[in-house]
Every structure is written in structure tokens, then in C-alpha cells.
């Protein structure tokens, strides 16, 4: 029998198993519920038949706003089986920000041209405004009500799913601009899943645990589609809200489920190092864990090293931590470090990196007076794919020269849905322009930052994540909750550098605040030889984030320019910065930020 060429064919093949599949842990006080691959296949068929009964036609786009992971999986496969194109959308989490959520959701539905939305009974009542905001939207229905339209054994009719069909639209999370719909075919997904499985040594005996949201590519492709194709023994899904409330639940389930694979962004490893108490770790055993992947946001060597050191006593292998690089426009994964490789980074002089050169010093070498930056190795590009580093004119650069990362191969998207202009900008000459900066060393990729996030002062390039990391080291600052950006200042004739940091607790008085600002400025000056113009101290939760939890630098800069970032005005207002920006702030913002959404 030939290997499946589409995700629906892969689910049909996996559907012969009644004993393996996905488990869902949505509430701490309730046991996880198993949905076998056989049950998933039957449920997806019924979902497809229900969509057809609602009047959804082949090629139409269907928005999925479903907090329940099992229902979401039913309906995304159901949409494919019905010949429709699924559009995952994150559920509303905070009614206090509902207007912003509604605007973002309306944009996605309009851009995708959705004719239907499938949701649940709790979300349905608050989505009425979508009908007026999205003219082509005909249907808003709950998953449960849709299923009642057809019998339990119903099957879809008249649809043949082909490899070149669009499987779903992955809307980028909007950290730098309005979300764009990455168009992915079954062929794109199957190609990327094949190299993921090879890079991670995935087999039918693999077991995964994930708290990642399923409306985002790492959770959806990595822990739903890929396990179905590989027919892995089991995956446990934890509610993302449960993880954020108590990070130790992820570790406990890794131990109890004897998981071999998990993935998470950098911040999650930091939470598990700083917020998990020793009392929560009694009996924890991570010895079965072969891969603890890290991606989706800038990777900090210190964060992963601290996690590895703390959990070594609980059986974590030194080589389990696996940095990677990926993006939605390349389906998901681009590079992996080796499964058996220990965590590796270059220690590069900040002045060298700022000039575009990556001359490394061994991590074990004695520290020198010059400011140094640790850049994590993200591994090699996959077989059958290509990666190069180019300069501003698109010319390939030699190893250890910093430039833009470009990609080529069967995992590259078809384009942005209904957006030919930005598609043409991203896909040029057969290469995908990622908008990310990096360099190669011995064929391995080291990622430095975003092209349009660069802070340029006196001809030097500074990566905002380096400023953010240094500020996070100061006592009193919430780690992982710092944003750095630069805005052109007409009077200074250069970029005005701002660091906005959330505090763990409110400072005692104005003097304590000023001392903390000076500590942050001093930390960055000593480490990066850069003098920050303003440090803005904020209450927890003040910095804007995407639906997947990533900090939004451009949104933070926009709010700063509007005087809306934080409740108090800082030194910038005394300099008259806001007055100068008011007349033409959008030109400043767009000159400094933009590009691909992360």
C-alpha cells in the first residue's frame, strides 16, 4: 500500500486503530479522555457531513473558533473531508479586550472570505457582530448543533481530496502587522511532516505531551497532523490556560505519560525554571523525554541552560533540549538541532555582531571585557530543502556573515491568501524571504533577529531581544516580559531607544523606580555598549501580546508613540518626543517596523 499523500488519507489509514490516539486534559480535576484514531476518523466524517448539511460547499472557507481541543480536531479534519478550507482562529480569552478580539477576528474572516464559522455554545452568543462585519458570512453554528443535523454514522459525499488542494489557512499571529493568511496545501504539510519525523526520530512508539494552542502552527501541525501521519502511540493535550496557571502540570504530565517528545517556546522553559516550586516536583521523572524542542520565539541560551541544570536531577538528558527554527510560511519547521546533540551556542562580541560579523569565542573561554552575546545554534536545514543567507541586495553571503535568511523547497507556502502584493514581496526568484536575520557556521544556522526589528544607532545594529534579555536579568523585572524598540527622533537625528519592562511588583516610591531604571540602563550599557534613552516601567500584563503569547514590539512602539503604553509619562514626554511624533507617527512606525507576522 502506498504512503498517504494527504492528511485525510493519513487519518483514514490511522483510523484502523481503536487503542491509540489523542487524550485531552481540559480540567485538572477530571481525568484525560482518550479519542482513538478510529474514533477520530468517524467523528471527522460526521463533522464533514454536518458541514455539507449546513450548506458549506467545496472550496469555501470555514472559521473554527473552538476552545475544546477534541472538537477542534474533529472539525479541522471535517472541513478537509468536506472539501472546505479551515481557518483556525483563537477563542476569546479576555472579555475586557473583546473589541480588539472582534476587530482581529473580523479581519481574518473578511480576508479569508469565510462563509461559515463553527464555534461552541459559550462563544456563539458573543459573535453576533461578525454577521454585520463580514458580508459573505452566512453561517455561525455550534459544533454540537451542526452534528445534530446528521446521523452518527454519516459520511461526506462527492469530495476527492488531492495533494495540491489547500488544506487550511494559517493566519499569522499579528505581532508586526495585520494577520496574513499563509496558504498551505496537503503537499506542503506532508513534505514538512516527513522531515520533522526524520529529524526527531519519530516512530509509532513515540508519545507526546503538548499544551500549545491548536490554532497556532506548532501545536496544530506538530502535535495533531504529524502524529496522525506517523500514527504515534499517543498524544496528550493540556489546556493552554491550565499550563499558564500552573506550569508544573506540563512537567507532571510529561512524567506520568512517559512522554518522549514535547515542544514549547523559550518563555515556557523560563517559567518552569523560576515559577515551579521544589515541592511540586516530588517523584518527577523526565528520563523518558528524548526531545524537548524549543522554537516559535527567540531562544535564549541562558534560559535553556538553567532549565537543563535544574531538571537534570529529575532525569532530563543533557541532549534532550533541541533548539529549532521555523515559520508559518515554511509550513512549520525549517531547521532542527541534532537529536543527540547537546545545547550549543556561539559567544559573539556585541560590537562584531552589530557590524554584521559573527566571530565566535568558545563558551568555556574566560570572559573578556568586551560585551558578549550568546547566539543559540538552531541546527541544519532539512533534506530536500535549501537555506541561504543574503545581503540587502539579495547576494549570498559567506559563513559567519549576518544577513537575511531565505528558504526554498516543498515546505514553502503557496502565498498569502487573497494578498498578491505581499505574496510577491515574500516570494522572489524562487526563494522565500523570511525577514529574519542570521548566519551560518559549518552549515548550521544561528538566528539573530528580525530585519525590521533592528535598532540602528550610529551605524550599529542592535537586536532588540538582546536588550530585552539583559533587562530581564535585573532584579524586580518580570523575565520574558520586556520589549525594546527604536523610533526615529527628529531632534536627535537617530533612533530613540526605548525599553519597556513589566515589574514583578510595584516599586515602593519614585526613588526606587528611578534606581531600577538606572540598573536596567547600566546592565544594557555594560553588556551591549548601548545607552538606552528611556526605560518605561509597567505593571504586569501591560505589554501587548499576540494570541499565541508573543510580545508585540510594533504594537508596543505604536502605543508608546500614542502615549498609551503604561499609565505614567516618562522622560520621553519631557523631551517632546510625543509632540514630534504626533504629526507623522505612522510614517515613523512603518519605517521602523513591519514585515512578516510572528
Image (cartoon, rainbow, N blue to C red):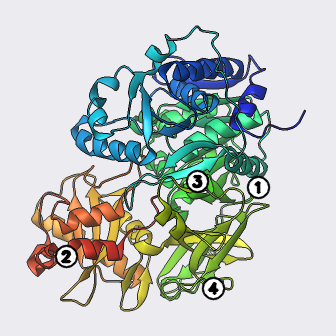
Q: How far apart are marks 4 and 1 (CA)?
A: 34 Å
Q: Which of 308 and 87 is in front in this view?
A: 87
Residue holding disc 1: 340
Q: Which of marks 1 and 3 is in front?
A: 3
SS class of the residue under badge 3? strand
Q: Which of marks 3 and 2 is in front?
A: 2
Residue holding disc 3: 294
Q: Which percent across, then down, holds residue 378? A: 64, 64
SS class of the residue under badge 4? loop
Residue holding disc 2: 584
**Is residue 247 among what the camera can see?**
yes
Res 123 label:
none
Lower position in the chain sequence, tag 1 or tag 3? 3
Lower position in the chain sequence, tag 3 or tag 4? 3
Q: Nearer the viewer, mark 3 or mark 4?
A: 4
Q: How crowded is mark 1: few (under 14 residues within 10 Å), some or many (20 or more)?
A: some
Q: Nearer the viewer, residue 349 or 332?
A: 332
Amino acid at each position: 500500500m502506498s504512503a498517504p499523500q494527504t492528511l485525510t488519507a493519513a487519518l483514514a489509514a490511522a483510523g484502523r486503530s481503536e487503542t491509540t490516539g489523542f487524550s485531552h486534559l481540559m480540567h485538572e480535576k477530571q481525568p484525560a479522555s482518550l479519542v482513538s484514531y478510529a474514533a477520530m476518523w468517524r467523528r471527522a466524517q460526521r463533522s464533514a457531513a454536518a458541514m455539507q448539511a449546513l450548506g458549506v460547499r467545496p472550496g469555501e472557507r470555514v472559521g473554527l473558533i473552538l476552545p475544546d481541543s477534541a472538537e477542534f480536531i474533529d472539525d479541522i479534519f471535517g472541513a478537509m473531508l468536506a472539501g472546505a478550507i479551515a481557518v483556525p482562529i483563537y477563542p476569546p480569552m479576555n472579555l475586557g479586550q473583546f473589541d480588539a478580539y472582534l476587530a482581529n477576528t473580523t479581519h481574518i474572516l473578511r480576508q479569508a472570505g469565510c462563509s461559515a464559522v463553527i464555534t461552541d455554545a459559550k462563544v456563539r452568543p458573543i459573535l453576533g457582530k461578525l454577521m454585520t462585519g463580514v458580508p459573505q458570512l452566512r453561517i455561525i453554528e455550534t459544533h454540537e448543533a451542526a452534528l445534530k443535523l446528521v446521523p452518527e454514522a454519516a459520511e461526506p459525499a462527492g469530495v476527492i481530496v488531492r495533494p495540491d488542494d489547500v488544506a487550511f489557512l494559517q493566519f499569522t499571529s499579528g505581532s508586526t502587522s495585520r494577520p496574513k493568511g499563509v496558504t498551505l496545501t496537503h503537499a506542503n504539510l506532508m513534505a514538512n511532516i516527513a522531515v520533522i519525523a526524520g529529524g526527531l526520530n519519530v516512530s509509532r512508539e513515540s508519545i507526546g505531551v503538548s499544551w500549545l494552542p491548536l490554532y497556532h502552527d506548532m501545536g496544530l501541525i506538530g502535535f495533531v497532523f504529524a502524529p496522525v501521519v506517523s500514527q504515534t502511540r499517543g498524544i496528550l493535550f493540556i489546556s493552554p490556560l491550565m499550563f499558564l496557571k500552573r506550569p508544573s502540570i506540563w512537567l507532571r504530565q510529561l512524567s506520568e505519560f512517559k512522554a518522549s517528545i514535547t515542544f514549547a517556546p523559550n518563555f515556557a522553559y523560563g517559567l518552569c525554571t523560576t515559577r515551579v516550586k521544589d515541592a511540586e516536583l516530588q517523584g518527577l521523572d523526565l528520563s523518558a523525554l528524548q526531545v524537548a524542542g524549543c522554537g516559535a520565539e527567540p531562544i535564549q541560551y541562558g534560559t535553556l541552560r538553567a532549565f537543563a541544570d535544574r531538571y537534570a536531577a529529575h532525569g532530563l538528558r543533557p541532549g534532550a533540549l533541541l533548539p529549532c527554527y521555523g515559520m508559518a510560511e515554511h509550513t512549520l519547521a525549517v531547521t532542527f538541532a541534532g537529536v543527540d546533540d547537546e545545547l550549543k551556542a556561539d559567544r559573539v562580541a556585541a560590537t562584531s555582531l552589530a557590524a554584521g560579523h559573527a566571530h565566535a569565542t568558545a563558551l568555556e573561554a574566560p570572559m573578556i571585557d568586551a560585551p558578549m552575546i550568546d547566539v543559540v545554534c538552531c541546527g541544519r536545514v532539512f533534506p530536500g530543502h535549501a537555506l541561504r543567507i543574503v545581503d540587502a541586495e539579495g547576494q549570498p553571503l559567506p559563513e559567519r556573515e549576518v544577513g537575511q535568511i531565505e528558504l526554498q523547497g516543498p515546505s514553502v507556502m503557496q502565498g498569502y491568501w487573497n494578498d498578491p502584493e505581499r505574496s510577491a514581496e515574500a516570494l522572489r526568484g524562487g526563494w522565500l524571504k523570511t525577514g529574519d536575520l542570521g548566519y551560518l557556521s559549518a552549515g548550521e544556522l544561528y538566528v539573530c533577529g528580525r530585519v525590521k526589528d533592528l535598532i540602528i544607532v550610529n551605524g550599529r545594529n542592535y537586536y532588540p531581544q538582546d536588550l530585552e534579555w539583559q533587562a530581564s536579568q535585573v532584579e524586580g523585572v518580570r523575565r520574558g516580559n520586556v520589549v525594546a524598540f527604536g523610533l526615529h527622533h527628529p531632534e536627535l537625528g537617530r533612533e530613540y531607544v526605548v525599553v519597556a519592562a513589566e515589574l514583578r511588583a510595584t516599586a515602593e516610591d519614585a526613588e526606587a523606580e528611578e534606581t531600577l531604571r538606572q540598573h536596567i540602563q547600566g546592565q544594557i550599557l555594560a553588556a551591549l555598549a548601548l545607552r538606552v534613552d528611556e526605560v518605561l516601567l509597567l505593571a504586569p500584563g501591560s505589554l501587548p501580546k499576540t494570541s499565541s503569547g508573543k510580545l508585540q514590539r510594533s504594537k508596543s512602539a505604536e502605543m508608546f508613540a500614542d502615549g498609551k503604553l503604561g499609565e505614567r509619562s516618562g522622560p520621553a514626554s519631557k523631551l517632546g518626543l510625543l509632540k514630534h511624533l504626533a504629526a507623522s507617527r505612522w510614517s515613523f512606525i512603518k519605517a521602523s517596523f513591519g514585515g512578516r507576522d510572528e
